[in-house]
């Protein structure tokens, strides 16, 4: 009878561990998704900056707002409140990306990279 209980405990622990790994991967995918969104906005901003545009147009503002709405709160808080220029928006997106990359770096599976 003790063996069955031990087997049940091991089984429950294995299921809990598997669920934890799945949750971690979902969080990682979410961070990667919003990082990709910031990359797209960053590309738009860099093009405008190269063309010498200084003010944000409505299209970029919409893309920025859409992206900021998807960000985790800690990353969203890094973006400045009053951004009217392309350069300030670029700087703000870099701050956001830094926050996202710090979290992703902590999630990185170093053992897989070294092997």
Image (tube, rainbow, N blue to C red):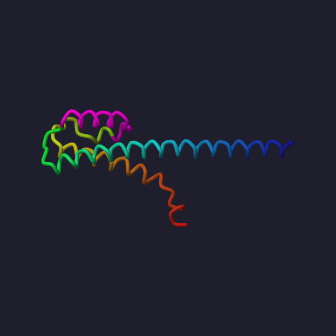
Left or right: 48 in relation to 27: left
Tell me the residue at 15%/49% (across/down). 51
- Measuring from the top left, give residue 37's x and y in whole percent: 35, 42
- Measuring from the top left, give residue 13's x and y in whole percent: 68, 44
- Measuring from the top left, give residue 75's x and y in whole percent: 34, 41
Tell me the residue at 19%/46% (across/down). 48
- Measuring from the top left, give residue 8's x and y in whole percent: 77, 42
Does residue 62 show up magenta in the picture?
yes
Instruction: Report the quarter where the C terminus lies.
Output: bottom right
Q: Which residues are magenta?
A: 57-75
Query: Considering depth in this image, is 92 or 86 the residue closer to the camera?
Result: 86
Left or right: 10 in relation to 57: right
Instruction: Report the quarter where the N terminus lies.
Output: top right
Q: Main secondary structure of the magenta part?
A: helix
Residue extending furthest toward the bottom: 115
Does residue 49 show up magenta in the picture?
no
Left or right: 93 in relation to 22: left
Query: Considering depth in this image, is 55 or 28 the residue closer to the camera?
Result: 55
Tell me the residue at 25%/45% (across/down). 44
């Amino acid at each position: 009878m003790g063996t069955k209980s031990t087997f049940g405990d091991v089984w429950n622990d294995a299921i809990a561990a598997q669920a934890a790994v799945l949750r971690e991967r979902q969080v990682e995918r979410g961070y990667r998704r919003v990082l990709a969104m910031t990359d797209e906005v960053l590309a738009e901003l860099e093009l405008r900056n190269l063309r010498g545009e200084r003010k944000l147009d409505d299209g970029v503002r919409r893309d920025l707002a859409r992206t900021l709405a998807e960000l985790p709160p800690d990353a969203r808080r890094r973006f400045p409140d009053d951004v009217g220029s392309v350069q300030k928006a670029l700087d703000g997106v870099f701050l956001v990306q830094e926050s996202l990359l710090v979290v992703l770096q902590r999630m990185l599976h170093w053992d897989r990279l070294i092997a």
